[in-house]
Image (cartoon, rainbow, N blue to C red):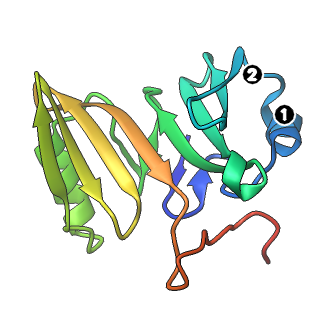
Amino acid sequence: MKINLKNGIDKLIFGMKQKDVEAVYGKPDRNYKDEDENVIFVYNKFKMRLTFYKEEDFKMGYIVASAADLDLFGNKVIGRNIKDVKKDLAQKGITKFTQEEFDTFENYFDEDHWLLFQTEFNEVVKVEVGAIINDKDEFDWKFGKK
């Protein structure tokens, strides 16, 4: 499944509503609300968790994924060494990562692309992508735009 920075993953586009996602992927395996009353969809088959923000009329704005076939710029990311992933991204001009460590995990976050890699033992185990916030401090929803 292809990661489309600033837009989503595969056929998922930031700004979709729950019915739009269900039309593409069917009913989720789990559907619950988090502490902020956002709706969360979990798809086991795709190893993805989607967040629909209550404050944004329940538009999808965040995806957490760990499927082995996740692809970014033609390269797999899950299971690869973070140094190799960062080297691939540097060729695309993506170099501004902040690093955070906790226990055996490390997070590498690029705010410009709202892209986060979670690693354990230097290996990427999870990818998180989010909708971009524009200069007006509003989400730049991509769904429905031409």
Name the residue located 66 percent from the left edge and 56 percent from the top edge: 14
- Disc 1 target residue: 22
Q: Nearer the viewer, residue 68 or 58?
A: 58
Mark 2–mark 1 CB contact (< 8 Å): yes
Secondary element type, mark 1: helix
> What is the crowding at mark 1: few (fewer than 14 residues within 10 Å), some, or many (at least 20)?
few
Tell me which amino acid carries mark 1. Glu
79 or 22, which is in the foreground? 22
Name the secondary structure under disc 2: loop
Point 59% across, 73% down: residue: 138
Name the residue: 19% across, 67% down. Answer: 95
C-alpha separation, residue under disc 2 versus residue under disc 1: 7 Å
Quadrant placement of the N terminus: top right
Residue 120 position in % (x across, y down): 17, 25
Q: Position of residue 37 (x, y in %)?
A: 66, 35
Q: Is residue 96 left or right of residue 135?
A: left
Residue 96 x, y percent position in the rendering:
20, 68
Q: Amino acid at mark 2?
A: Pro
Q: Within 10 Å of the Cα at label 2, are there few (<14), some (14-19), or many (20+) other Cα atoms?
A: some
Q: Is residue 58 above or below residue 15?
A: above
**Residue identifier under label 2:** 28
Label ID, residue 108: none
